[in-house]
Each structure stands twice: as structure tokens, then as C-alpha cells.
Image (tube, rainbow, N blue to C red):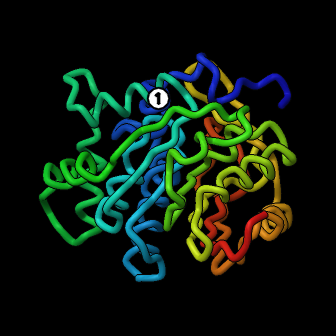
Amino acid sequence: MKGNKVYHQKEFSAKEFFETCLSADSHPAIYEEVVCFPMRQLHKELSSGHIKGKTLIEFTLGPVLFKLLVCCEYFEEITVLEFNDECSMELKKWLKKHPEAIDWTHVSQFACSLDGKSNGWREKNEKVRERVKQVIDCDITADTLVAPGVLPPADCLLCIWGLDVISKDQDDFQKNLEKMAALLKSGGHLLLFGTINAELYKVGEHSFHIVNYDEEFLRKALRDCGFVIESLENRPRGEFSDSIIYDSFVYVRARKVRNP
């Protein structure tokens, strides 16, 4: 891990992460790749009709709302699993309309534009609040992400860089992927966003760890965990920014066909 900090430590600031990567004032290249690209990809995938079902489990990175603003139109029951206490607190603030919650208006408006609408962002926010049934704080070092019987197997799992930032190395990535797969129905889908040949990302003055892997490793890890890859897109990085160092983004749609 080369001395970099890890996501679930206290040094990770939810608000600094928002300002660095997710706010309207973020570096345009970072905002495009961290927010706009995943939102467009998710909208394209979910609107295609490939993914069926009512339940979604989302493995989150940061107090990140943008994924839910897309998914709320396609899933009736959403559960968020969070591995960082501060980020969990910030997300819960927004869900409860706390006056000091992070303002995601700019992202809500972008989500509406993906739906072909020029307004309606307030209604979309309320739909997210209605459909997120729970935010569960998880211990990534435990044998299971949630206690047995807490969650029924989901129709779909969504993970946007969550595995990359919580896993110490490739072996740990495989173990964490197995834990995730255990929460998915047989025949259900995993929508996975990751980074190829990543080194680190920065939040404020701190550098944070991202596990390094290539496409070949990712394909094998998914097969070994009982998935069949239906679609894989490898997107070279755009404009350079030293806030996130990696070669490319990868997006995978995979279907669970067996238990690991």
C-alpha cells in the first residue's frame, strides 16, 4: 500500500472529497470522470432494460449521491453499504434533510437532464429519499459484510470504486468481491466500476490507497467469484490530473451464475 492511507480510516474527509471530485467547482476533468461518466454509463445501462428486479445494494465510496439519482428510477428498494463513518453520517444527513447536509443540486439537475427533463430535480431528490430504505455501516475486516439474515439477496449490486479503495491488495480484492457476491441472487447482476493500474487518489493533503490491478486480473477475479461477464468497457483516462492517478476506467456488467 506504499504508506498511503485507506478509505475507512478517519483521515478521509467526506466534505474535502466532495470539494475535490464532486462539486460544481471541482477540476472539470475530475468531475467528468468521477461524476458525469459513471452517471451516463449507469443511465445507459439501466434504461436499456438489461437489468431486472426491484432491489439494489450499493457499495459506496464517499457520501456520494450521484449514483442513487440514476438508480432511483429503476429500483424500488435501495440499501447502501458504507465503510467510512464520516461518509455514512454525511449521507444520512442528506437523506434526513439536515440543514448542514452537502448540497447536491447540481448533480440532481444533471440526472434530470439524462432523463430528458429540464426540471424536476427536487422531485428526484425525494424519490431517492423514498427508495433508500437503509444505510448500513460495515466492517470490511469481518467475515461477512452484514450479519446473516439482515438482507435478502438483491437483484443487483452496484460498486463504483468501492472495491478498489477498501482492498489492501489483489488477494484482499478477491476476498471482498466474494463477500459482495454473497449478497446477490443467483442470476442477478453486478455493475462494477474500477480503475486499471491505479496508484493513488488525493483528498485534501492526504494521499489514499487504491489497489492496483489490470484487466486480466479483474476478468479472472470475476470468474472465480461465480460471475459471467456480459459486457466490459475499458475507457482510457481523459485530461491528466494528479488528484487521481490511473491508466483507465473499467466498467463491467456481470451476471452471477454460481456461488464462489
Q: Residue at x 37, y 37 (%)?
A: 23
Quadrant in the picture for the C terminus: bottom right
Residue 44, above or below 125: below
Residue 249 picture location, percent across and down:
64, 59
Q: Nearer the viewer, residue 33 or 137?
A: 137
Asked if 68 appears above or below 223 in the picture, the reply is above
- Residue type at tag 1: Cys
Left or right: where does residue 48 sit relative to residue 7? left
In which quadrant of the rendered image does the N terminus lie?
top right
Q: Please give left or right for residue 199 compared with residue 110 in the image.
A: right
Quadrant position of residue 194: bottom right
Residue 88 in the image, given as x and y percentages of width and height: 45, 30
Q: Within 10 angstroms of label 1, few (less than 14), some, or many (20 or more) residues?
A: many
Q: Which residue lies under the disc numbered 1?
A: 87
In the depicted structure, whether residue 145 falls above or below residue 256: above
> Measuring 51% from the left and 24% from the top, which residue is drawn there?
85
Which residue corresponds to the image point at 75% horizontal and 69% vertical from the top-left?
226
Across and down, in percent, residue 13 comes to 51, 22
Q: Secondary structure at mark 1?
A: helix
Q: Is residue 42 above or below residue 151?
A: below
* Residue situated in front as seen by the camera: 33 or 83: 83
Q: Residue furthest front?
A: 149
Image spot of residue 235 (x, y percent)? 64, 66
- Would you identify the image quadrant in which residue 94 lies? top left
Q: Count all numbered tags in the image, as a single digit.
A: 1
Q: Quadrant of residue 98?
A: top left
Residue drawn where x is 21% and y is 54% of the image: 127
